[in-house]
């Protein structure tokens, strides 16, 4: 019986003492990566989900729920897309997109400034891609009309000729940028309007004009008191609209008093 007991005792001793790894070996083992929780390997797809193809928000610079500065987003090279072809049919977005122009005040003193905000809201249950012309940045042009529908802010007389250094210079290439507003999302463009008339800029200043944008103007006299329609021409493209450009030219009435 003693012969059989000795191996059992030895086995128990080995299990309780000899089975443990030295401290140094245990430390080295702890530093080895766990094969069950390995870090994901980059695949060159911008971190997109391998199943849905979705990318993290930081990898979608041209898409958002609340785009606070649309002009800044559109100016990014990452948002450029091929220009629409002439044969491409414009999209009718009536009822799908709401565009409105909201002033900080509907009344202003002659010569004073008013903040204008264009709100673009996605009314569909999905994504709403919109395209704009950029050259190289998007231009949102403010126009002012009096009660008779006549432009009230432009300089009188014919437009002067640009200096030869400007008229002969290459015109910036017009490109297209796309932004996508997600479901229930909005985008904003913030502008400032000054209740003044304009005059043609001095000849010296015209030397610095941007080719293709006409002769520059500078602020002149305050607008007379009265009611005016403020209209913003957006560089929105690929959208079907009526003869009065209801989609791309939102407007609002402001009284100068």
Image (spheres, helix red, strand yellow):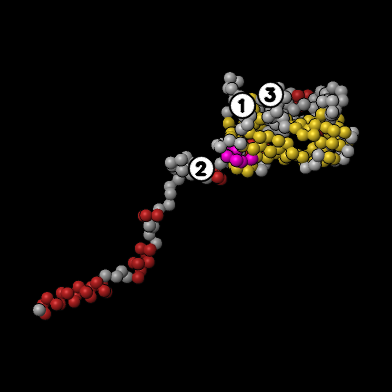
Q: Quadrant of the N terminus?
A: bottom left
Residue lying furthest bottom: 2
* 3D distance between C-alphas at marks 3 and 2: 37 Å
Q: Which residue is mark 1?
A: 92
**Which range of residues does the magenta coloring cover?**
180-186
For residue 242, the mark is 3
Write the residue at 71% across / 37% down.
118
Q: Position of residue 91 (x, y in %)?
A: 60, 26
Q: Position of residue 190 (x, y in %)?
A: 72, 40
Magenta-colored stretch includes residue 184: yes
Position of residue 151 relative to residue 114, above or below, is above
Q: Which residue is mark 2?
A: 55
Nearer the camera: disc 2 or disc 1: 1
Q: Position of residue 153 (x, y in %)?
A: 84, 30
Magenta-colored stretch includes residue 246: no
Q: Quadrant of the C terminus?
A: top right
Given residues 243 and 194, the one toward you in this image is 243
Write the residue at 38% across / 57% down.
34
* 3D distance between C-alphas at marks 3 and 1: 10 Å
Write the residue at 77% across / 40% down.
103
For residue 200, the mark is none
Q: Image quarter for residue 211?
A: top right
Q: Secondary structure at mark 1?
A: strand
- Say if mark 3 contacts mark 2, CB within 8 Å: no
Q: Earlier in the sequence, mark 3 or mark 1?
A: 1
The local crowd at label 3, few if under 14, some if 14 to 19, many if 20 or more residues have their Cα within 10 Å, is: few
């Amino acid at each position: 019986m003693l012969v059989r007991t000795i191996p059992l005792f030895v086995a128990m001793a080995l299990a309780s003492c000899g089975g443990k790894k030295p401290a140094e070996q245990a430390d080295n083992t702890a530093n080895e990566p766990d094969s069950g929780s390995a870090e994901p390997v980059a695949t060159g797809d911008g971190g997109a989900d391998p199943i849905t193809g979705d990318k993290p928000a930081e990898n979608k610079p041209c898409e958002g729920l609340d785009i606070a500065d649309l002009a800044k987003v559109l100016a990014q090279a990452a948002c450029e897309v091929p220009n629409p072809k002439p044969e491409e049919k414009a999209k009718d977005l009536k009822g799908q997109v709401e565009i409105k122009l909201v002033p900080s005040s509907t009344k202003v003193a002659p010569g004073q400034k008013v903040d204008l905000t264009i709100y673009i809201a996605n009314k569909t249950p999905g994504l709403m891609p919109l395209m704009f012309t950029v050259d190289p940045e998007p231009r949102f042009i403010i126009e002012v009309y009096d009660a008779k529908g006549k432009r009230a802010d432009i300089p009188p007389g014919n437009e002067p000729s640009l200096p030869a250094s400007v008229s002969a210079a290459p015109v910036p290439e017009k490109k297209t940028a796309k932004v996508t507003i997600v479901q229930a999302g909005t985008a904003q463009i913030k502008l400032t309007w000054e209740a003044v008339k304009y005059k043609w800029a001095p000849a010296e200043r015209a030397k610095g004009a941007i080719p293709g944008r006409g002769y520059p103007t500078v602020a002149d006299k305050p607008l007379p008191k009265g009611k005016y329609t403020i209209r913003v021409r957006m560089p929105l493209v690929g959208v079907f609209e009526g003869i009065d450009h209801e989609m791309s030219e939102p407007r609002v009435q402001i009284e100068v008093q």
